[in-house]
Image (cartoon, grey):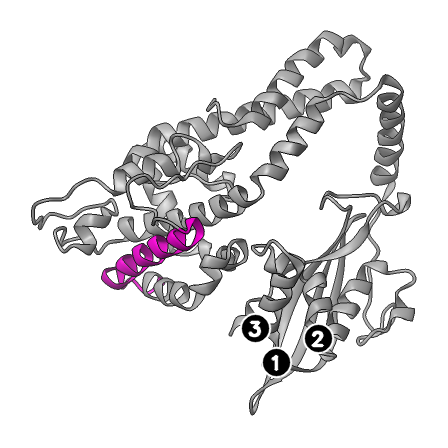
Amino acid sequence: MDSNLHSAQKLKAEIQASKLFRFLMTKEQKEEAERIEIQLNHTIEVIEKYYKYFSDSGWCLYDSMNIKVAEKAVIAYETQGKEEGEQVLLSFYKSDVKEVIHWIKNKAKPFMDRYDLIQKAFDDHFNGRYYASIPLFLIIIDGAVNDYTHSKGFFAEGTDVTAWDCLVGCDDSLLKMQKIYTLSRTKTNNDEIRIPYRNGILHGRDLNYGNEYVSCKCVALLFALADWMQLKSNEDNRKEQFEKENNPPPISESLAKIKQNREDRKIISEWKPRKVIIEQDMPRCPKLEDCEQYPYVVPIIKTFEAWHKRNYGELSKHLKKLFSYEGTDSKRAGECKKLFSSKQLIDFEIQEIEERGCCLTRILTKVTWKKEDETITELLEFGSAYLNQNDETASPWRNNGEWQIIPWKVQGLYE
């Protein structure tokens, strides 16, 4: 396991230590411990094999990547060969990745500033115009990293792309891609390349670069760098939390926590979702007084109230996760104003409510606004999650958090 994955190493050590006390555990606790160990070992195995099989070919693994895609690629490699393994990755980056492009802009301001260019590059990419998409991706990547570091682009010598306790900070991730992609290309080459050699492509030496392999690897790198910027920005907080967790609490506190966890598990196991029927259980255009039994709708109502009143400071607080790449409330309010000031809210309706867990509900809304002389109606999907002040899942029955909005499918706001 890569030495940079501190949390995974810690969890593995804790699992090994817990085996000394398995005789004190209930049957259910033993099964849960075994399940966690199997899942952790499997995930580590997939990560290590992915690096071994694909990193030399320029495929970057990153923290937000769907581990099922990596697993499928590894299995295809082992059963059918490298070509089939890469076909799994090509298929993902040519089609399925469409659903998560908006993640890039939400993770770091340099990518938000370039989102128009990013959309153009993806349009070329999805339509097979690889000779156009690839240089544009490389330009976006270099400029975004330059803005983030306030110093150098990704492909410049000496640019530090390390990050603590994450996949993109591992030796076989961004560091390796940086070395591969910046290899010297001193001669004109007419043969097809399948790696995004930045210097050869942008300096006109690698002429036969326009293929799905090169473009898809640029897409993977784009997502990896978005993860890196986000994880680098909160690196100090993550380290502090890690150190705090390594200092064990008093025994009395641990015993109280065990009792609380047992009670919480009982409540969660007994929880059943309600079928919420719009217009019967909840008005299509609800007010706060309609939400006594459905508190997860409250932040939705407050969000649209703030939008209607053009209170961008309040709106940015409710949509904090939409502007998570900004580090302060004032900057988030500024970004919120840029996005919403041209949109005059007319009305909103709740279309669907789906209780997915005792701490998470899916809410689909139909929103109409006016932009210049055009009236626009879009479906916007949100999650409403019960979180504490550390953005961790909390327990509504303990009143130790609040319902917060998580933007899920809100691409319509950027049209």
| Residue type at numbered disc 3 | Lys
Q: Kindly indicate whether the residue at mark 2 contacts the one at mark 1 (C-beta within 8 angstroms).
A: yes
Q: Quadrant of residue 158?
A: top left
Total marks shown come to 3
**Magenta residues, start to end:** 126-150
Q: Can residue 71 be seen in this snapshot?
A: no
Q: Which residue is mark 3?
A: 338
Question: In this rendering, is residue 410 above or below 401?
Answer: below
Question: In this rendering, is residue 154 above or below 13?
Answer: below
Q: Quadrant of residue 236?
A: top right
Q: Secondary structure at mark 1?
A: loop
User: Magenta segment, principal secondary structure?
Assistant: helix
Separation of marks 3 and 1 at Cα, in angstroms: 10 Å
Residue at 61% over, 32% down: 239
Tell which tag, 3 or 1, sits nearer the viewer: 3
Q: Which residue is mark 1?
A: 343
Residue at 67% over, 33% down: 241
Q: Quadrant of residue 136?
A: bottom left
